[in-house]
Amino acid sequence: MYAFMVSLIVYLQCVPLSSGKTVSGVFRSDAARENNGQYITRFLFQGQNGLMVYRLFDVEAAMEKEAKLLLYQTPKGADNLSCLEYLSEAKLTITLSAEEHNQTIPSQGFPQTWHVMYTDRYTCQEGDIDEAQSTIRLEISLFNPDAAGNPLDHFSAEEAGLHTFYFLLILAYFVAGCIYAQPLFQALNKGGPMHTVLKVLSIALMLQSASALFNYIHLARYSRDGIGAPLMGSLAEFCDMVSQVQMLYMLLSLCMGWTLSRSRKAQSKPLQWDTSPASTALALGAVFTQGALLVWEQFEDTEHHSYHAHRSMAGLLLIALRIILALLLASILYQIIMGERSALKRDFYLSFAKGCFLWFLCHPVLVLLSVVFSEHQKEKVITIGVILCQSISVVILYRLFLSRSLYWEVSSLSSVTLPLTMSRGNRIRY
């Protein structure tokens, strides 16, 4: 628990908190000139009745600078265009000349991304701009139409529906907890051969539930003010990261334990997790690698989504790691299954393999399949798909290790081929 709290504090200190679709900031002429305009944010408007509202805190300075907001649909590379040519590509130009202004977004047949940038008369000017060092404070709110067609919805088209999904997910966790919490608690209190696995699965499931709850809290507030609760979003991603790392360590340790136990004539501690140097080094190496990639990804993509489309280098490396680990597990389990004569044990290992592969491969497969979906659907397909697939994976593993009809029979056949089987002394209790 102490290690968990230390990791949480370090994560919250290192990973920046993201802002929502109510964006406030300070804009400078020199920053705008460096990049042919100072980038503000992006938003997927849903066809009709889109609205952008800005609030200006220093009208005189903005008018003196001839400050403007430019809206692009598909911004072209500034390297191939001159500064003036690049600014002229904007679909909408809004002059900052009032304390507050409402700008309706032109109707479009399908959701499209709009990018907002700040510029002024110094953006394309060469030479010194010492007189332009004053800053402009600005707040921008972006809205999509709600169910009644009124522009009051802060959610971008790619986020629409996630709030409802997390509510239903929390409801499903609550109902399942009410039904299965007591039998599971009793099984954990008994101890026995599956105690360690059930404990890890339960902690991983609780972390997933906490992640869903934190995401719901963040999105519930986000729907009201467009900012949300960034701390809750960061906590949701942290809980998901810990769950991913914990499941990775468990699955690798079990597979390596089964493999290494077969090379021994006897297993002195059949009820304990295999702690040989080879299995521990492999599991910890994979855990640290995945953890580092997950944290690196958070620095590159600060929007609160536990599952990303992986356009960054860290995301691509993370997908590659999951595929490599899935192939490693497949190789280990294939060797075990092919060398196993008992049909009951083969069924046990096959069910375990299904849970493993579903956990590791659902994310890479969904990222690959998302290319056929439109831009506003990709994030939702990946997020909802991965959460559901990994929940199904946990259910498969729960049923496998709680099943008396299969696991008890496998345990009774041999007390040395499985690292978490019952000993003869403990078998009398059941």
Image (cartoon, rainbow, N blue to C red):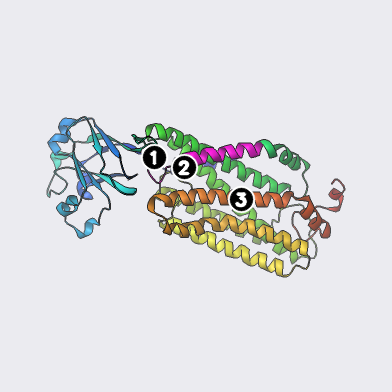
> Could you give the CA–CA distance between mark 1 and mark 3, rounded to whole angstroms?
28 Å
Q: Amino acid at mark 1?
A: Phe
Residue depicted at x 24% and y 37%: 103
Estimate the x, y position of residue 88 in percent, counting from the top left. 17, 51
Q: Amino acid at mark 3?
A: Ile
Q: Dot 2, crowdedness within 10 Å: few (<14), some or many (≥20)?
A: some
Instruction: Please state if 61 lies on the left or on the right of 115 as rendered.
Output: left
Q: Earlier in the sequence, mark 1 or mark 3?
A: 1
Q: Earlier in the sequence, mark 2 or mark 1?
A: 1
Q: Where is mark 2, residue-wise?
A: 162
Residue 164 in the magenta stretch? The answer is yes
Helix, strand or loop at disc 2? helix
- Residue nearer the viewer, 272 or 221: 221
Helix, strand or loop at disc 1? loop
Q: Amino acid at mark 2?
A: Leu
Residue 162 in the magenta stretch? The answer is yes
Q: Where is mark 3, residue-wise?
A: 392
Question: Which of the 4 quarters of the picture holds residue 78?
Answer: bottom left
Q: Secondary structure of the magenta portion, mostly?
A: helix
The reply to whether the C-beta atoms of the residues labelled 2 and 1 are less than 8 Å apart is yes
Q: Count of labels shown?
A: 3
Q: Where is mark 1, residue-wise?
A: 155
Evaluate whether residue 9 shows in this view.
no
> Could you give the CA–CA distance between mark 2 and mark 3, rounded to whole angstroms?
19 Å
